[in-house]
Image (spheres, rainbow, N blue to C red):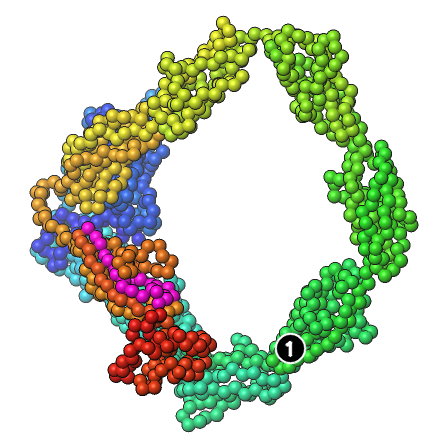
Amino acid sequence: MGRKDSVWSLGEGQAPEELDKPIDTPPLSILLIEKPQSGTVAVGGDITFVAKVEAKDLLRKPTIKWFKGKWMDLASKTGKHLQLKETFDRFTKIHTFEMHIIKAKENYAGNYRCEVTYKDKFDSCSFDLEVKGLSISEGQEDAGELDFSGLLKHREPKQQDDTPEVDVWEILKNARPDEYEKIAFMYGITDLRGLLRRMKKIPKEEKKSEAFAKKLEPAYQVDKGGKIRLVVDLADPTVELKWYKNGQEIRPTPKYIFEHKGTQRIMVINNCTVNDDAAYSVAAGDEKCSTELFVKELPIKIVKGIEPVKTTVNERIELECEVSEEGAQVKWMKNGVEVPTGVRSRYRVKCEGTKHYLVIDDASREDTGTYSIMATGGTSEAHIQVDLKPLKIYQDLQDMTVLLGQPLKLHCEIYPGNVPGRWYRNGQLIQGFKQLISNTIFVFRVHRLEIETTSLHDAGDYTFVPEGYSQSLSAKIHIIDPPRVHLDSLNFPDNTVTIVAGNKLRLEIPISGEPAPRVVWMKGERSGHRVRAETYGDQTSLTIEVTEREDSGNYKIVLQNEAGEATASVKIKVVDIPDPPEAPLVPVVGGDWCSMSWEPPKYDGGSPILGYFVERKKKQSSRWMRLNFDLIKETTFEPKKMIEGVPYEVRIFAVNAIGVSKPSEPSKAFIPLAVTSEPTMLVVDDITDNTVTVKWRPPETIGAAGLDGYLVEYCIEGSNDWIISNKELTEKTKYTITGLTPGCKILVRVKAINAAGASAPRTLQHSILVKEVIEPPKIRVPRHLKQTYTRRVGEAVNLVVPFLGKPRPKVMWLKDGKPIEPSHVSIRNTDCDSIIFIRKAERSHSGKYEMTVQVENHMDTAIIDIQIVDLPGPPQCVTIEDVWGGNVALVWTPPKDNGNAPITGYTIQKADKKTMEWYTCIEHYHRTCITITELVVGNEYFFRIFSENMCGLSETATQTKKSALIVKEGTTDLKMPEYNDHDFKEAPKFTQPLINTFAIAGYNTTLNCSVRANPRPKVIWMKNKIVIVDDPRYRMFSNQGVCTLEIRKPSPYDGGLYTCKAINDLGEAQVDCKLEVKGQLQIMLCRVVKRTKVSTFNTSNLIKHLKNQHNAEFKEFANSRLYLSEICGKAVCLKKNVVECKNVNSTPI
């Protein structure tokens, strides 16, 4: 198969005019669309060889190898003289492989080969490299490698061999081709192919053949089924000639025809097949010449594909496909899986000439799918859909409800009548004990299912499925059974259940009934509200998680279903525990004990109190500890062994024969208290002219009651009157005494305070002179402010600069040598730092801020550099410098405003003039000129450029004023005609006006009209020429030019003239209508007046008719004679049996 993939051509000695059939052009390369070409390079020069592979039909990147000579793989030889490069163009889908030879040397010359592999495809190409200045001598031959001799180990020079030198050139010239490899192995030649190539370039004297004037070409190629002619020219026509195929003599047959034309001897091979791919030779006397014939197989193509089929079950399916050649091998697939065609398979495959068939005799629904046929030259597929047959139903199955134990009969009527079927219950086939009965009535078939005695298992969904049809008949059978309560299984005397209060009660009672009965538990005549009743399939349960005395009583169970009702009663008796005692009292508290007392509980639970349990706990804990394990008969107790300073609580439990009561409420918390030790390490921290600051550490021993705070006292030296400095306790260990007289001396002491009282005082050993000490100022600039402080425009600036100095230093700020305006920058100074705050930074806030701290004659300064940056402006000017091919050269100038920060780059975008959708070409570009490439020929582009600094891109971009038209080279510009757009603007015009409407009070009504206008008009609704605005009784809609006004529950006062007005820039239009709202009473009066004759129409008759009405409103309306007299006093007109009342003072009729 490797030889069949090679590319061969006919020899030069075959005359074209002698061929009966023209020879096809050799097939093109399978993978390579551009092959490396032989080249020449001077010594020290560079050269590049390029190979390209098209990847449109490839799923992954192909594999490429570069060789020098016959075996040397150049992938391992890359370095400073050899580089391999691979690129891929996503637009053209082409892989480009390049081999760069840098600074070529003389021994780089030779033959090279490029091999490309992708799955089962293979392609190769050979090319030569010639290095100018190359000198060939006997001692210097191409070793088939690049100059990598420097990597080899240096060897000692060999000893001179006295053996006479052998001339390999002369040996190869005189040897047969089949002896070349043997000679190369004998004399150590590594690159035999390069040596033979050089030998081929040496002019040699051709040895004339005595028998052949012209021999066979080295190789021939022919397509399968074609004809080939092998021609030799004899020097002596009388010589006997014999033809051989793979060493066996060929005899004349219809396939092999021998022809004689003068001195030419021709063998014609007809209808070439794969078996004809062999080595052929011809012998003339003692001489022989040979050649090889390659037969190329043509792919089998599908001439007529298979067609989709839609049929029903049990039908025959036959798929037909026609291919280009008889006897071709094809493969049938279903849903991508090969169709089995064995003896027991449902599928049969047959072939008639070029037609292939796939036959399914008895189709089923499982045969639905996508079928395909595969040949070497293509595939064809089609979808087969197999559906069930339709069925006509004359009488369907009916849902039934049957009493338990009664017979069940199901029947249905279908057409056609000879269709068998199966019965299913809940999806399971009915077999064995069920009987299927079928009776024929006329031409229809009635199918019946009868069950003599039904059980609960017979309930469910019944289905009759006709065989081979898509429809099925279903019915639901419901078996019912009256409910029953089974109390016998409880084994409780008199159906009474006794339970101790506080325990969980769960009473389970068996029940029966179908369908499952509805269960209701009742206590007395009402449902129990503290119980939880649950019902399962065959039982009901009553659950009380924690029983109480109130749960005692008779409980009634009521069961109901559609078959009947059942009741039963159960008595529950709850025995309770005593109530908890009152909260105990703790009158006396000692160091680790207390005395407590309590009163007995008010209710003993029906059993005498046997004693009490006492528990205590720490107040902050939730864990109670029992103090006695034997019951206490008295109502007093003394707990001991308590921890001093810990809050405690106690509680009581009462005990009777039933159990232990709930705990009483805890007593009030009580704490054994103890004062703390004195504070430690009292020292002076700071002194001013009128204040003294002292600090200390907490006491070494703090009582269990904790530490509430400290009390600071002082006295003037020489006096014993201690003055309290802090009226309220301080929790800090540092305090400043204020209001002192300068120059005086004081003593200071500190006490620790807790709930038990004050500790012993800690006093300073020496008196303190109230006088401030001067400390030179020092600014401590934070590390991040020693560099330029950068913020964006709009951000807040909040800088804190700490400093030292006593007394409080004076702080001054300057910006660029000028005072800072408080309206622009806020500055706040404290004793130890200065804060500069800018709420919303602006670029004008940038500059050098100088801070000066001064204490009397001492001074310190610091400079802080603040830079406020903003987005840059767009470039000043963007011009198109040049347009050529698919490239455009752009030039622009930097922006005038850089945003107070250096420009870091530009973003270039392009837009097609047709769509004006912008696409980014390049980002973060640093230069002010660029060439945009790969533009589409025939499109016209605009360009725009954004500036960029550390804040980001400029808000706007500068666009080229002119566009760049990408014109194909060698074409002329085509001037497109200009077209004017049609003006669709139109003043408002109502296509459907408003219509006068009558409405009934209390019922919503709508007014509708339609208007046409462009641009879209503003629609205004008015009532009696007054615009309707924000009135909840009106809703206005406008959709596709249809304007609607909805009036919610109108009253007679909503009647009037309504106007719809449409306005736009080109004009306005309006339409009007009248709305009349009638009340229900008015409508009834009109009907009464309409029935009454004019001669008898008076107040008495009207009242009589109104009182006969069933509506109470009309009866009440009839009692108002004054109003009715006014109605009867008006004019009454009769016209076409219509009575109309006019000028009624109140609501019109």
Task: Report whether residue 986 is seen.
Answer: yes
Q: Please state the horizontal and vertical placement of residue 387, each as a whole percent of the image.
A: 38, 75
Residue 782, percent from left and from top: 48, 18
* Identity of the residue drawn at 26% across and 58% down: 1025
Quick one: 194 or 581, which is closer to the camera? 581
When asked about the image quadrant of residue 76, the answer is: top left
Asked if the magenta segment contains residue 670, the reply would be no
Mark 1: which amino acid?
Gln
Nearer to me, 743 or 192: 743
Q: Is residue 164 above or below residue 622?
A: above
- Residue furthest out toward the bottom: 442
209 sits to left or right of 577: left
Residue at the spot 15% in from the left edge and 40% down from the top edge: 965
Seen in the picture, residue 376 relative to 933 is either above or below; the reply is below
On the rendered structure, is 855 left or right of 282?
Answer: right
Magenta portion: prevailing SS class: strand
Q: Label 1: few (<14), some or many (≥20) within 10 Å?
A: some
Please state which of residues 308 and 1113 is positioned toward the viewer in this rendering.
Answer: 1113
Q: Position of residue 741 (x, y in %)?
A: 64, 10
Element type at marker 1? strand
Answer whether residue 1050 is magenta in the image. Answer: yes
| Residue at figure coordinates x 51%, y 82% from the top left | 399
State whether residue 343 appears in this view: no
Question: What percent of the width, then of the height, locates residue 94?
Answer: 26, 44
Residue tagged by mark 1? 560
User: Which residues fall within the magenta stretch?
Assistant: 1043-1065
Examine the image and state in which quarter residue 677 appears. top right
